[in-house]
Every structure is written in structure tokens, then in C-alpha cells.
Image (tube, rainbow, N blue to C red):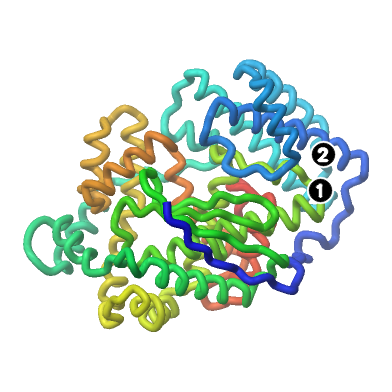
Amino acid sequence: MKRLSLVAACLAAMTLVHAGCLSGVEDQGPAEGDAMNQLAERYVKLVLALGQHDADYVDAYYGPPDWRTEARNSKRPLDQIDKEATALQQSLASVAPAATVEEIVRLRHTYLTKQVTALQTRVAMLSGRTLTFDEESKALYDAVAPTNDPGAFARTVEELGKRLPGSGSVLERYDAFRNRFVIARERLDATFKAAIEGCRSRTLQHVKLPPGESFTVEYVTNKSWSGYNWYQGQYKSLIQVNTDLPIYVDRAIDLACHEGYPGHHVYNVLLEKNLVRDRGWVEFSVYPLFSPQSLIAEGTANFGIEVAFPAQERLAFERSAIFPAAGLDPGGAAEYYGVLTLVDRLSYAGNEAARRYINGQLDATGAANWLERYALYSSPRAAQRVRFIDQYRSYVINYNLGKDMVKRHVESNGGTASNAAKRWDVFAQLISSPRLPSGLQ
């Protein structure tokens, strides 16, 4: 494992305060706040308890260390966790806030209720309950992805076939085309540094972060994912980049924005600052991966790429900074991104492969073949994606459906492409709050 330290310099500014969430409403009374804090503690301990049965469940935790120790030492059985979760739901229902209280307090209550529902679903799954792809995604992530006709994907593949040079199948020609844009291993350091600096500088023009935030990047292998942010608390992240497969030049900005700025790192930093530290809401010190929070986290991380780098600005930055750092000819950037724009229309083909695989309509080989045919995944990448589905199942919806839902929310609240300042403002409000998928408008 090779470690690359990328320092995000300390900033002498406090985090954003979003007046739109705080005006014109009554504050929550101290009694109600105390009750919610007690319920929040019960929730965190249940998440940690379930994490003893599911190694992927607790994605991040930076609350009291003795709570984690207690969970490890006691290892409550699944049926007990389920009973305690049911009791917690009943307690939450008894302290539902009035419509007149501060909006963020109402969002907190909804957040906890939805998160506990997802926890109960994960307990049921670990106990042997079988759910369809859509049933699972609704219960865990508070959303259902649309069903797409494979004919639409086939037509896009055909359109790509007319555009790609060379002979052979569309997939073969697409692979050959993309191989011209691989970042050489010895240039990964310089390329990712350039990408992170670009994402960070653009983010900091619009979002104020607390002093001392930073992250470290590691290159790893033998993973089912291409990149991962492990939030450590104290405004620190560990970002891992998987080098099992070739890393194409577009992944530099994608990963730097998605995992770092304004994606997962910024999302977690703002939640810690605004909700855990400023408000004392301990439930945000734990992040259960299989929960509605993940759709917001992945959706904002993916849409954050577009927020930080609108298409034409990204193309200019790729030409001036990323392609040179990668040792690639900037003259090919426009052609490359023109092809990727078409390929992006195949995004939901991955959801269909997962849906059919989880529902038993395809086996692992059939799912990989589907990804090769309709999503233009190379054979190794398709095999990696099937391993991802084996491990994370319906989680795949959080990337594309999440991005689309977040984009609609931001734009419907005035954050259109023609109003960059408002777009950043609405985006920053979203990643600083407990809003969840069914609450996006």
C-alpha cells in the first residue's frame, strides 16, 4: 500500500450559517431537546451494535470511544437489536415536534425515524429476510430507482458505435479509445494533486470550512470500489483510491471532487461542525452505510463534481492542468469528453444489472455480460462491479438516482446552471443539514 499525503491547508474562517433554516420559527424547548438527545444516544449505540454483525455497516464513527467498546464487548444478538429499535421508534413517535418548531429540528426527527427504519431493515436482511431490489432500496435508502428499457441503452451504444474509430465491437473500440487516456502510474501523484487543488480552490470560494480540515490519500488494491472516503472525525478523512484497474484521466477530477471537495470530505466536515459540535447532536457522529443518509452523501458527492466544474469550465481545466499533469495531449480532451457525455447516458444500465441480479433474473455471469453489453464495461471492470453488487447490493442507486434527485432539489430551489452563486448556496445548505431523500423538493 502506497501512501500519498495531500494537505488541505487550515482556513481561518468559521463554517457557514444558513439563515434560511433558522428564521421565522420557534426554537425547540429544552425538554424536547433533552428527550431527543437521549433517543439519539440510543440510536448510535444500536448502530454500533449492528456493526458487530456487519463489517460494512458502520462507515464512520467519532463519538465517545467507550460506546464502541461497549458494543464490542456485549455483542447483542440481532433479535435484541430489533426489539430495541422497535422501542426506539415508539419513543420517537411520542416526541414528534410541532410544525412551528425550527425546521432543522423537524428534519432531525425525520432523519432519526428514517434511519431507524433502515436499521431495522438491515437487521431483517442479516436475519435471512429476502427483499426485491426495489423493496430493499426503498427501505434502506428512502428511494426507488426508475426501471429502464434496455432498448434505450442499446440505441445509445449504437450511436457510440458510429462515433468511435476503428473496427471490432463497440465495446472493443471504446476500450481502445479510452486506453489513450490512461494516467500512467508514475504520474498519479502529480495528477491527483492538480485535481484536488482545483476542486478545493473552487469549493473554498463558496463554502467556508473550519480550521484544520485535511485528508490523506492512499493507493490500495483488491477492492470492489474505485474510491472510498473513510471519515475519521476531527475534520479529517482518509481517502483510498483503488489501482486494480487502469485509472483514466477523467477519474482524477471525479474522485477529487466526489471523495474530497465538495463531496464526502466536505459533507462530513460540515455535519460534524454544524450538527455534532455546534448543536450536540450525537447521532451524526456515526454513519451507517446502509441508510437513507447514503443517497444524500453519494448524490451530493456526484452532483458536486458538476457544481465545482460546469462542463465548459471543466474542459478548460482539464486542458490546462490535468492532461499535462497526466502526460496526455490536451488536444484530445474535447473528443474524450464528447464520448463520455454519450456514455453517461448508460449510467442506469448498471442499476438494471443489479436489479436483475438481486431479483434472481441474472446470475453473476449474466450480470457481467449485461454490464459489458449495455454499460460498456470492460470484462475486468464488469467483474469488479458484480463483486460490488454482491457486497453492497441496491446501494448502486445512490450514485445516479442520488445525483439526479440532488440536482432537481438544487435547481428547483434556484440553484440553476445560470446562477452559480445560488447553486453553491443551496448545495452547501443541503450538505449541512439532516435532509433525506423523501424530503428533497
Q: Residue at x 44, y 37 (%)?
A: 392
Using the image, determine if residue 153 lies above or below residue 287.
below
In the current view of this chain or complex, which residue is farthest to the right?
30
In the current view of this chain or complex, which residue is farthest to the front?
2
In the current view of this chain or complex, which residue is farthest to the left?
167
The amino acid sitting under disc 1 is Gly
- Residue receiving disc 2: 37
From the top left corner, tell me how far across and down residue 237 is, in percent. 59, 55
- The answer to which image quadrant residue 223 occupies is top left
Using the image, determine if residue 193 lies above or below residue 21.
below
From the top left corner, tell me how far across and down residue 266 is, in percent. 61, 61
Q: Residue at x 58, y 63 (%)?
A: 410
Q: Residue at x 38, y 38 (%)?
A: 389
Q: Is residue 229 left or right of residue 130?
A: right
Q: Is residue 402 left or right of residue 370?
A: right
- Residue receiving disc 1: 280
Instruction: Inspect this view and state whether residue 343 appears.
Output: yes
Q: Residue at x 28, y 76 (%)?
A: 328
